[in-house]
Amino acid sequence: MSTIDISIPQDRSPESISKFSKDLNALGDADEYVVDFGSPRFMPPFSMILLATQLRQFKIDRKGSACFAKNYEKHSYAAHMGLFKAFGLDHGNAPGEANGSSTYIPITEIGREQIEREASALDKHPGFIIENRSADLAKMLTRFNDGPLLDTLTFSIREIIRNVVEHSEAENAYICAQYWPTRHSVEVGITDCGRGIRDGLSDNDRYEYETDREAIQIALLPGVSGNIAAGKGGDDPWQNSGYGLYMTSRIFRHAGSFSIYSGDAGIKLSGSTKTDIPPHLKGTAVRMLLDTRLVSNLDSQLDQFRKDGRNAAKNMVGAAQITASTASQMLSRNFAT
């Protein structure tokens, strides 16, 4: 019987866990795989949820082989947050089982069908349910009932979850987050195992791209959506305008960093910098890192970003197709006009 040992990186940063996903995918065939979690180390929310997503998908991809784990018993924080049960190991809390606190949201599952059932029962658009769910999660994380931090997190969580429900075709998404008041820092991670950004944009033939990286760059542009009717007007307040991902990335790029992974590509935006962090991921993962000292009135921030986006979008209106080259140039100059 052949066995392959898999060591979880001791460096639990998102960059390290991202690289691990490529190494995991490159492993050869074996009768069994043994995942060694090593010594306990702190793992930030996005790294935790990304690792759970990778290991869950690995088990699916290697379903003909047995998968075991060792040295996981002392990882009490990860067990409490739901890491192990999130990928199928019977240890610790299940996703959403921990109550959370004023500083963290444990790994929590958000089901698309559940959202649609609740919306149908209330005769509401699914966007209404997502809005309320996002506000509840933001309040759980911050213990604030109002203010710019709550507004920023509610808006951002809502827009990422809407992308999952409306475009990914995933059955569910997972969220994990932590707030460090003394460090003035918030981190939110959201993942899904849907069809990914490149496939999601394929419904709209206005976009021209060949790789996952090119598709991500286009997806971050203002007015971009896989829905060909996005932004066409009408009275539906929940209509997809194609601005949600652009606005969210602008908020976190301005006041922290925004990272998005899909397929074999990942891009981190922070200030004026753009960094490639290539993973191997089925679906999409988003990391939002916020310096709370830089959060001002959300309405004024969104107004400015929206104006920037509209100006940038005007440059694309006459184009029959939007290319990855256009997207790369606009991202590099942070949509300056």
Image (cartoon, helix red, strand yellow):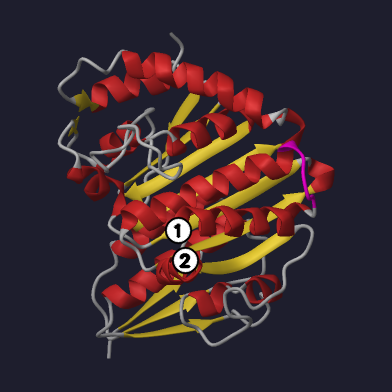
Residue 72, image quadrant: bottom right
Q: Which residue in the protein does label 2 denote?
A: 115
Does 145 lie within the magenta span? yes
**Residue occupying image coordinates x 71% and y 28%:** 297
Question: Hey, what amino acid is under mark 1?
Answer: Pro
Please say if 82 is above or below 176: below
Task: Give the extent of the magenta segment.
Answer: 144-148
Residue lying furthest right: 182
Mark 1, Cα crowd under 10 Å, few <14 / some 14-19 / many 20+, is many
**Residue occupying image coordinates x 64% and y 78%:** 97
Determine whether label 2 and label 1 are within 8 Å by CB: yes
**Residue occupying image coordinates x 49% and y 82%:** 69
Residue 173: x, y in percent?
Answer: 45, 63
Residue lying furthest bottom: 1
Please say if 145 is above or below 113: above
Residue 44: x, y in percent?
Answer: 63, 56
2 or 1: tag closer to the N-terminus: 2
Q: Quadrant of the N terminus?
A: bottom left
- The reply to whether residue 145 is in sight is yes
User: Quick one: 33 or 158, which is closer to the camera?
Assistant: 158
Q: Which residue in the protein does label 1 denote?
A: 126
Question: Hey, what amino acid is under mark 2?
Answer: Ile
Q: Main secondary structure of the magenta part?
A: loop
**Residue occupying image coordinates x 49% and y 69%:** 118
Residue lying furthest top: 337
Could you tell me which secondary element the residue under label 1 belongs to? helix
Mark 2, Cα crowd under 10 Å, few <14 / some 14-19 / many 20+, is many
